[in-house]
Image: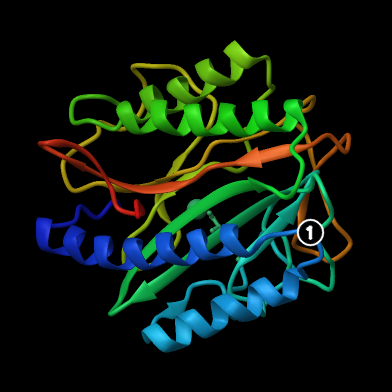
Amino acid sequence: MIELKTPAEIERMRVTGRFVAEALTEVCRLAAVGVNLMDLEHHVRGMIKRRGAESCYWDYAPSFGDGPFRNVICLSVNDAVLHGLPHDYALRDGDVLKADLAVSIDGWVADSARTVIVGTPDAEDQRIVRATEEALDAAIAAAVPGNRLGDISAAIFAVAQAYGYPVNNEFGGHGLGRTMHEEPHVSNRGRGGRGLQLRPGLTLALEPWFARTTDRIVYDRDGWTIRSADGSRTAHSEHTVAITDDGPMILTAN
Ligand code: MF3
Ligand code: CO
């Protein structure tokens, strides 16, 4: 079942989205050489508490993790790309950090992720970050009434192909609203003109992520963190978007 949201409900998700954006901006600002991932985790915990928000991650026990998750943010470094479990690690020069955050305020969820390079950036790392950001822009542009879900997937895949990055098909975007993970699944690889018709009121988390040289993933021994199978570096960009008659609304913009 896919639940369409009213304009008033989308407005409430926008309120949550603005907070998620603020928190991610703060994480990216704080991410520097020597900063521990646990410092970032605790900083966001404080922000969530002060705002009266609720973490969507804390105690979450999905099939894809060795649950329950006991942190409020996913922090994935270098070859780690999704669901990175915060741990005692001090960031190093050139690290590629992905921060992924979903919270709920007054019952409405927003989910967003950004990639930031710590210290001196490597040109190849900058390129893959740019690729996921461009893929996200393309995905958002395709999120209009009349298009189909496959048009979003195809838009992401086309950008990946232009850059020469392979695309994994197991983890992608998703519907969200009252909860973090709702139908439909949004593949990062697909054919245009196929799948669900996009209608006003559909709210989606769009989240292209790529690894430089593989579409395969491996789980870390921590039971959560997903890494590129060949150890190559990765990037991830995610926004929560509402499909409306006036075009796509980015709910997790600052
Ligand atoms: N925010 C992630 C997503 O985009 C989900 C993380 S779930 C966690 O789907 F349990 F790992 F935190
Ligand atoms: Co998501």
Mark 1 neighbour density, 10 Å: few (under 14) some (14–19) many (20 or more): some
User: On the image, which quarter does residue 9 sit in?
Assistant: bottom left
Instruction: Where is residue 199? Give x, y as percent.
Output: 19, 38
Q: Residue, x 63% and y 16% (percent of image)?
A: 163
**Amino acid carrying mark 1 in the image:** Val
**Closer to the camera, 182 or 247?**
247
**Closer to the camera, 63 or 141?**
141
Instruction: Where is residue 68? Give x, y as percent.
Output: 67, 78
Q: Give the left or right position of residue 183, taking residue 27 as reference.
A: left
Is 246 located above or below residue 109 in the figure? above
Is 128 located above or below residue 205 in the figure? above
> What secondary structure is marked by label 1?
loop
User: On the image, which quarter does residue 78 sit in?
Assistant: top right
Q: Which residue is label 1 attached to?
A: 33
Say which quadrant the C terminus sits in.
bottom left
Q: Give the left or right position of residue 69, taking residue 3 as reference.
A: right
**Closer to the camera, 173 or 127?**
127
Instruction: Where is residue 135? Give x, y as percent.
Output: 49, 28
